[in-house]
Image (cartoon, rainbow, N blue to C red):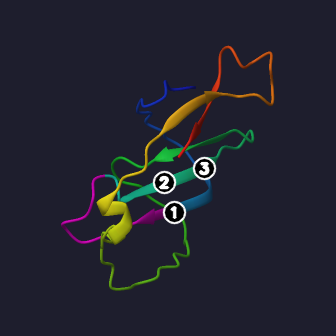
Amino acid sequence: MAAAPGGVMSLRGRFEIVSITGAIFPAPSPAGATGLTVYLTGWQGQVVGGAAVGPLAASGPIMVVAAFGNATYERLPLDYEEAEAPKKMHLKPDSANSAAAQSSAVLTV
């Protein structure tokens, strides 16, 4: 049973856990910084995975490894030169591949 990208599937039955990864940060954290991603395999070998929405229940013992730290978000200031004179961007045709030069360009900064 396949779901559309961005869609939600409800799975029932027994699955093997292939991978669980995620991060939980205290508020205020950037949107999308927290979440849980789970990959499961079924009895026929099919693999399904994605962002977990809702509860997960294990039918047996599992091991969870967690790391804790003092998470902070910092935005580094611009260098003085970058703040004074922003770089100009120029587009030029890609000369390495003359057939594609008509349709592609290389961005140089």
104 horizontally vs 90: left or right: right
User: x and y percent of residue 23 in the render?
Assistant: 40, 66
Amino acid marked by disc 1: Thr
Determine whether 55 is above or below 65 in the image.
above
Quadrant for the N terminus, please.
top right
Checking the image for residue 21, the label placed there is 1
**Relative to 62, 83 lies left or right:** left
Q: Residue at x 80, y 31 (%)?
A: 96
CB atoms of marks 1 and 3 within 8 Å = no
Choose the circle earlier in sequence order: 2 or 1: 1
Q: Position of residue 43 (x, y in %)?
A: 70, 43
* Dominant SS in magenta: loop
Question: Relative to residue 103, is residue 64 drawn left or right?
Answer: left
Report the residue marked by disc 3: 40
Tell me where the magenta segment starts and ends, as one range: 21-31
Q: Quadrant of residue 107?
A: top right
Figure quadrant of residue 81: bottom left
Mark 1–mark 3 distance (CA, rounded to whole Å): 12 Å
Q: Secondary structure at mark 3?
A: strand
Mark 3 surroundings within 10 Å by alpha-carbon count, few (fewer than 14), some (14 through 19), many (20 or more) = some
- Nearest to the eye among marks 3 and 2: give it: 2
Residue named by callout 2: 37
The label number, if any, that marks residue 99 in the structure image: none
Secondary structure beneath dot 2 equals strand
Q: Amino acid at mark 2?
A: Thr
In the image, residue 99 lies at what x, y percent?
80, 15
Q: Residues within 10 Å of mark 1 (few under 14, many from 20)?
A: few
For image coordinates 27% across by 59% down, the residue present is 30
- Determine if the magenta segment contains residue 9: no
